[in-house]
Amino acid sequence: MEILLSALVSGLLLGLVLALVALGLTIIFGVMDIVNFAHGEFLMVGMYTGLLTAQGLGIDPLLTLPVAGAVGFLLGIVCYFGFIKFLLRGPMVAQLLGTFGLMLFLRNLALLIFGSEDRALHHGLLVGKSFDIGMGVIVSATKLAAAGLSVAAFVAVWLFMNRTRIGKALTATALNRSAARYMGIPTERMNALAWGAGGASVTIAGALIVNFWSVNPFIGLLFTMIAFAIVALGGFGSVPGAFFAGLVVGLIMEIPGFWDFFMFTFNADWMAKVPMTSFKYMWVYLAYFVIMVVRPRGLFGWKH
Amino acid sequence: METLKSALDFSDFPRLDLVVAGSLAILFLIFPVFPHSSFAMATMIQFLMFSLYGMGWNTIGGYGGQVDLGKAQYVGIGAYTTTVMLVRWDIPFWFSMPVGVCFAVLWSFVLGYPLFRLKGHYFAIATIATSLVLKDLFEVWDFVGAARGLEISPIKFPPPDFLRLIFKEDVYYYDVILGFFFVGILYMNWFRKSRLGFQLRAIKDNEEVARSLGINVHWAKIKTYAIATAFVSVVGSFHACYIKNIEPEDTMSLDISILIALMAMLGGAGSLWGPIIGAGILIPLKSYLKEWLGATAGLIGIDLILYALIIMVISAFEPRGIWGIVQKVRRRRQ
Amino acid sequence: MALLELERVTKNFGGLMANHEISFAVGKGELLGLIGPNGAGKTTLFNCISGAYPVTSGRIFFDGEDITALKAHEVARRGLARTFQVYVASGDLTVIENVMVGCFMHTRSRSRARAQAGEVLKDLGIHDLSTALLNELPVASQKRVSMATAIATQPRLLLLDEVAAGLNPGEIEEIMGSIRHVHEELGMTVMLIEHVMELVMKISHRVIVLDYGQKIAEGAPEAITRDPAVIKAYLGERYAREHGAV
């Protein structure tokens, strides 16, 4: 029973953080119908930023979040004005390959600068600490904090999109680009803002994740696929969709944990022979594929 | 008969193209006679292989406009079929290669049916996902050596072995892949003028219009996907015999899928010469950059950074690739 | 016997009723006009007939066969071709290549397709455009090419969707000639959606009027122009009342 509960809790906590990872992708997609293949690389930038700032300044990793956010915002804006703007004139194929190029660029730049080895945080207020939340379920403090901050970030973004003038303008642009332009909303600046906000949210997620996940230059693709799966499930462009879909995908990634539970419960030896944990993240890829084929609009599709 | 005639008929190209293509063909044929380094030879073989990969991708990706970023899984299927059959049952290349094609094509039908319900971005991402799933499976499958991969031992199969395609000198491999290369060009020349070729271009233009002209869009895409797959699988089988040591990481990784797509995109997707031009630029660039920069200064990744910049510039400023620029200049001159 | 027969065809988009219980028949060799104000559901009806949209209810028969559930390409292969109002092309294909795609419905041979395509282009008087790219052409020519491509599939019934919209009087005259040619020389049954009244009233044998998704009138062109319901639909209630009173 503890195994089941642990898997459940751990899946949900991870899901909350993953939802934050996907948030930026869904904002960008919602506003301008462009899929950012470099999304996971933005996350990697956030992870390195968190790690290096914490180590360089000797501060707690959780204090690096504003730095990571600022870096992500800048990165998003620079990418938009320096590159994405030009892609928008071309066909869909060009957009696809363009952001793919961006992904390769960031990934290999990181490889050049940081080398290929894994790096992890060893010191910090919460790093390595964990506590029992009852029923024998042990939760690591960093995951709990990350999940909590992720929820806070979601609430903040939701308030921003629905309560502030500029956020409403962003939503309007997402719903109907040309109508928004006729209303006098500067859509060009809205695009840039979407990239800035998207970049900031994902780098913050990165700085959170680096508390319990080691970073290397190749980590991006995994998170890109996770984010795609979440956004596909939640509906491309939907913010609440990303939140709930994040929880679902978090649970999907815990499948090896549930597997263990059933193995012990039913004493099934054949189950032990299946190398569940070595399937790594196959479930996420599979989930994306199945979701897209079965329900292309996702659970909360709102635009099409 | 008409098929063969169509495959051999290049008359709709300007004479300049034919002169350039002809002289290059002759150059490729006599290349082994000239003194060359083994490095240059290896680069040439890579170039021919990736031209073929690119030609295959070009059918569905170029003419059909469906951006497929999961071709590496079929490289893997071809390579693994050949290696497993050789290592376990001593079945030579010329028999295992067609079997590999059958497996790959079968798998492509299984995947293609649901895949082509998706469009655009969604399709592209899904192709990546399928390829990564297969790679993950191969990495834990003991029968094919799991993550360690499989090795074709040159001691067990003493070279030169024409049936099993085991050689010590690269020049034999060069001859074989050059043969495939010429067959590939002829096939593509036929394909672009065939009914399916025309239908695909119509689909790329506008699916709704294509349907109204009696084209079964879904089926046409699946068929073409299978053709692309067959190309890739053949070269995958060759790759296994040439490299002699395959593992999931270097036959089925995403990087391979990207490279395959990139050949045609850079050279000009949807044109006969595009993939060859792309491979002719990218492969030597990759090999020599790696040789000069990567190895000497310890600058790993710099070749891929350059690749990335090329992709970015091309996609932002000339999505039709180099051949697109050539054609634009030509149309302006007229 | 009727070539095309619609039986209470209804199409809903969510709550919006685009077509409501429309029934009519098109006889072999007929030239039928379909008119109606903007948003009356004319193009939706074409989409239903050609299989691009599934109908919500009702049945469609083509040459006696029930084609209601068929997909667009299956309908096309049975000899029902259509043109499109807005033609978005990426510009990969030249004009003759475009028309060849239509020809490929009946042949596998490229040379035969090419010869046939040339013939169709000559028939419509646009042979000189053969090597132009579609997206470089003016709208008038694009519409002719779209028509040529549809004709190249050798249909028995040709649906033309606003082929004359946005053309100047000279061009309208030309396209009218093309339609007549297709109808008389090639023997195709033609059904056309048109806003240009001088065209549709001049060449149609019979006209059907749609308004708010419903068929409000059907008859000979002269009768249609005097029909109070039609005048009301086009010019508004007040106009109809005032002029009816005069």
Image (tube, rainbow, N blue to C red):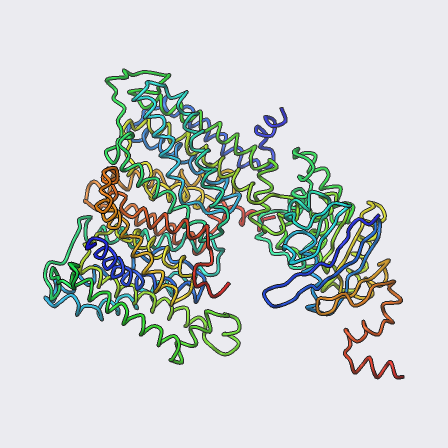
Quadrant of the image containing the N terminus of chain B: top right
Horizontal and vertical percent position of residue B199: 60, 42
Relative to A133, is C186 above or below?
above
Q: Identify which residue, B94 or A132, lies in the foreground.
A: A132
The residue at the point 41 percent across, 65 percent down is A238
Relative to B11, is B253 above or below?
below
In the displayed orientation, state which residue is furthest to the front: A266
Q: Quadrant of residue B190?
A: top right
The residue at the point 40 percent across, 43 percent down is B70
Q: Quadrant of residue C215?
A: bottom right
Horizontal and vertical percent position of residue C29: 84, 49
Q: Identify which residue, C226 or B310, lies in the foreground.
A: C226
**Left or right side of B40 for C209:** right
Q: Quadrant of residue B165?
A: top left
User: Is residue C128 visible in the rendered structure shown here?
Assistant: no
Horizontal and vertical percent position of residue C205: 86, 58
User: Is residue C30 visible in the rendered structure shown here?
Assistant: yes
Q: Identify which residue, C62 or C152, lies in the foreground.
A: C62
Relative to C115, is A40 above or below?
below
**Left or right side of B324 for C16:** right
Q: How many marks are shown on the rendered structure?
A: 0
Horizontal and vertical percent position of residue C179: 80, 53
